[in-house]
C-alpha cells in the first residue's frame, strides 16, 4: 500500500518532464520509504533500477551490468562490463537518444566498494550533461555518507546535482491515511507508538486494538520491532552501546547535558559528540528555548516516536517480555500512556498550526514554532509554554496542549495569558488544544477576549 509522498512525486515528475539531464540525490533514514518512492516514480517509465549490495566492487559491477544489459537488449545476460566507467558510459550514450532513468539505490554500498566511482560519475556528467537525457538518481540510507561524500562541497559530485530530496517520516495527516479503521484517539496513539516511518507503520494493524498492537509489535520477542532500534544502531554507528545508553537516559527523563552525562557515566564532551550524531540521524532533537539562538538551557528529547516508545518501555521490561508476560507488561505501560502522549500531542498541534498557516487561515503569520521555558521573575518560578510562534516584533501566538480526560478549565487559559506577559508583543493570539474539550468558564472567557482559539483534538482530525 503506497500512501502520501505527493510533493516528492510531483518534484520527481517535474524533473523527469524537463527532458534534459537531471541528477537527483535522494536520501533519508533506513525504513523511511525511499525504495518505495523510487519504484512508484519509475513505474511505467523507461528506467534502469539497481540496488547496491554490501559486497565488493566486482559483485556490484556484475549486478549493475545485468541491469543495464537487460534494459538495452530486453534479455537477461550473464556478461559484465569491464569497469564501472564502461557500464555507466553505456547508459549515458543510450540516454542521448531517449529519456532514461538510472536509479542507483543504496549508492554508499557501491561507492565504498569502488573508491573511484564518484570521480567516474563526475567525469561522465561533465562530458555528457549537455547532450544527455538521463535522469540519474543516487539514493542512500547512510545519512552521513550522502551528506559528506555526495552533497558536501568537498565531494567530487558537488555542484552536479540538480535536486536533492531528504525523505522524512510521514506527518500525522499522512499517517492517518493508513489508519483508516481507527477512531480519532487511536490514530493519535498509533502515531505516538510507531511514528510516521512507513516500515514501522506497516506493523500496525488497524483492525486490532491499540493494546493488541502494542503487545504484537513491542511485547513479542519474535516481532520485527522488538530489536529494531538496537539493530538500526548497529548499522548506523560504530559504538552502539554508548548510543543506546544515551537514548535510554533521555527516554527515562534526562534532558540536559549534565543529566545525560551523569546517567551514562561519560564526560559531557564525550556525550556531546554522540548526541550530535544522534541529532543528525533524526533520532534525537536538540531544543533551545524559542527565540534563543544559543542557550545553556538547551535540552534533548527523542524525536522519533518508535525509538521514544521502545526505549521508554521495552528495556525496563525486557526480562518479563522474554518470559512471555505481555499482558502483565502492558498493565505496567498503560497508566503511563497519557503522560507519554503529551509530547506527541504537542507535535500534532504544531502540524495543525502549520497547516492553518499554509492554507491562509492562521491568525498569526509565524515563521517558526517552538517551545519556550525559562524563569518567571514575578512568580519566582520556572515557566513553560508548549508552543510559541512570532510574526514580527509586535505579533506572536502562544499555545497550550492538554492530552487528558478532563476538560480544559479557565485557570489553564489564565496561566497561558500570564506567561505570555513575559514577552513584549502587543498583539497576542492564544490557542488552547484539548483532547477532551473545554469547560463553560473557559469557553465564555475565550469569547470575551476574542483573541483565543479553542481547538479540540476532534477538530484537528476533521481538518485533515
Image (cartoon, rainbow, N blue to C red):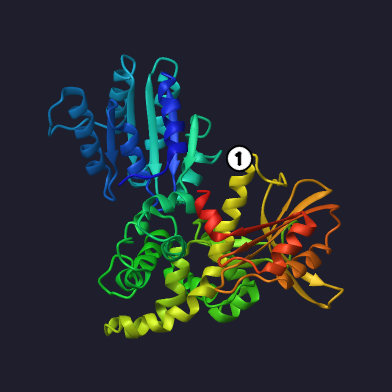
Residue 457: give x, y in percent of width and height: 55, 60
Q: Residue at x 31, y 17 (%)?
A: 98
Q: Secondary structure at mark 1?
A: loop
Q: Is residue 74 left or right of residue 302?
A: left
Q: Who is closer to the viewer here, 20 or 216?
A: 216
Please name the residue shown 22% across and 30% down the image: 81
Residue 229: x, y in percent? 39, 66
The residue under the point 38% across, 27% down is: 135
Q: Is residue 157 shown above or below 144? A: above
In this rendering, the answer to whether 169 lies above or below 417 is above
Q: Quadrant of residue 421?
A: bottom right
How many marks overall? Answer: 1
Between residues 82 and 32, which one lies in front from this camera angle?
Answer: 32
Q: Circle 1 is placed at which residue position?
A: 359
Q: Residues within 10 Å of mark 1 (few under 14, many from 20)?
A: few
The vertical placement of 345 against 6, above or below, is: below
Image quadrant where residue 349 sits: bottom right
Left of 297 or right of it: where is 401?
Answer: left
Residue 95: x and y, percent? Answer: 32, 19
Q: Is residue 71 visible?
A: yes
Mark yes or no: residue 171 visible. no
Horizontal side of residue 450 vs 335, given as left or right: right
Towards the viewer: 200 or 385: 385
- Residue at 70% across, 63% down: 443
Q: What percent of the width, then of the height, locates residue 262?
A: 60, 81
Amino acid at each position: 500500500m503506497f500512501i502520501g509522498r505527493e510533493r516528492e512525486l510531483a518534484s520527481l515528475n517535474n524533473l523527469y518532464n524537463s527532458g534534459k539531464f537531471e541528477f537527483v540525490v535522494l536520501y533519508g533514514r533506513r525504513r523511511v520509504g525511499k525504495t518505495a518512492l523510487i519504484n512508484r516514480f519509475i513505474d511505467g517509465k523507461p528506467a534502469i533500477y539497481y540496488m547496491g549490495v554490501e559486497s565488493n566492487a566486482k559483485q556490484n559491477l556484475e549486478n549493475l551490468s545485468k541491469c543495464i544489459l537487460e534494459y538495452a537488449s530486453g534479455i537477461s545476460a550473464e556478461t559484465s562490463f569491464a569497469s564501472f566507467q564502461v557500464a555507466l558510459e553505456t547508459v549515458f550514450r543510450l540516454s542521448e537518444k531517449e529519456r532514461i532513468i538510472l536509479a542507483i539505490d543504496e549508492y554508499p554500498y557501491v561507492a565504498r566498494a569502488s573508491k573511484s566511482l564518484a570521480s567516474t560519475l563526475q567525469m561522465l556528467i561533465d562530458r555528457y550533461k549537455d547532450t544527455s537525457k538521463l535522469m540519474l538518481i543516487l539514493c542512500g540510507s547512510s545519512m552521513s555518507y550522502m551528506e559528506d561524500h555526495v552533497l558536501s562541497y568537498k565531494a567530487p559530485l558537488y555542484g552536479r546535482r540538480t535536486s536533492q530530496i531528504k525523505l522524512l517520516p510521514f506527518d500525522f495527516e499522512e499517517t492517518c491515511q493508513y489508519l483508516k479503521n481507527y477512531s480519532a484517539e487511536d490514530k493519535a496513539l498509533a502515531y505516538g507508538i510507531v511514528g510516521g516511518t512507513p516500515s514501522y507503520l506497516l506493523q500496525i494493524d488497524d483492525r486490532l486494538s491499540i493494546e493488541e498492537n502494542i503487545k504484537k509489535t513491542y511485547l513479542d520477542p519474535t516481532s520485527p520491532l522488538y530489536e529494531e532500534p538496537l539493530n538500526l544502531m548497529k548499522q548506523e554507528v560504530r559504538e552502539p552501546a554508548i548510543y543506546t545508553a544515551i537514548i535510554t537516559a533521555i527516554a527515562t527523563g534526562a534532558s540536559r547535558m549534565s543529566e545525560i552525562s551523569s546517567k551514562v557515566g561519560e564526560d559531557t564532551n564525550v556525550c556531546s559528540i554522540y548526541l550530535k550524531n544522534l541529532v543528525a540521524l533524526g533520532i534525537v532533537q536538540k531544543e533551545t528555548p524559542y527565540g534563543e539562538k544559543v542557550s545553556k538551557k538547551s535540552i534533548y528529547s527523542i524525536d522519533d516516536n518508535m525509538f521514544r516508545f521502545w526505549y521508554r518501555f521495552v528495556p525496563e521490561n525486557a526480562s518479563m517480555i522474554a518470559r512471555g508476560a505481555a499482558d502483565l507488561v502492558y498493565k505496567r505501560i498503560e497508566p503511563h500512556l497519557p503522560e507519554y502522549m503529551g509530547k506527541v500531542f504537542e507535535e500534532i498541534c504544531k502540524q495543525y498550526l502549520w497547516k492553518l498557516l499554509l492554507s491562509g487561515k492562521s491568525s498569526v503569520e509565524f515563521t517558526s514554532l517552538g517551545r519556550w521555558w525559562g524563569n518567571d521573575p514575578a512568580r519566582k518560578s520556572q515557566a513553560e509554554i508548549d508552543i510559541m510562534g512570532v510574526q514580527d516584533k509586535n505579533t506572536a501566538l502562544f499555545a497550550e496542549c492538554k492530552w487528558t480526560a478532563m476538560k480544559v478549565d479557565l485557570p489553564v487559559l489564565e496561566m497561558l495569558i500570564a506567561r505570555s506577559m513575559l514577552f513584549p508583543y502587543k498583539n497576542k493570539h492564544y490557542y488552547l488544544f484539548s483532547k477532551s474539550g473545554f469547560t463553560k468558564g473557559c469557553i465564555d472567557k475565550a469569547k470575551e477576549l476574542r483573541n483565543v482559539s479553542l481547538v479540540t483534538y476532534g477538530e484537528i482530525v476533521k481538518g485533515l
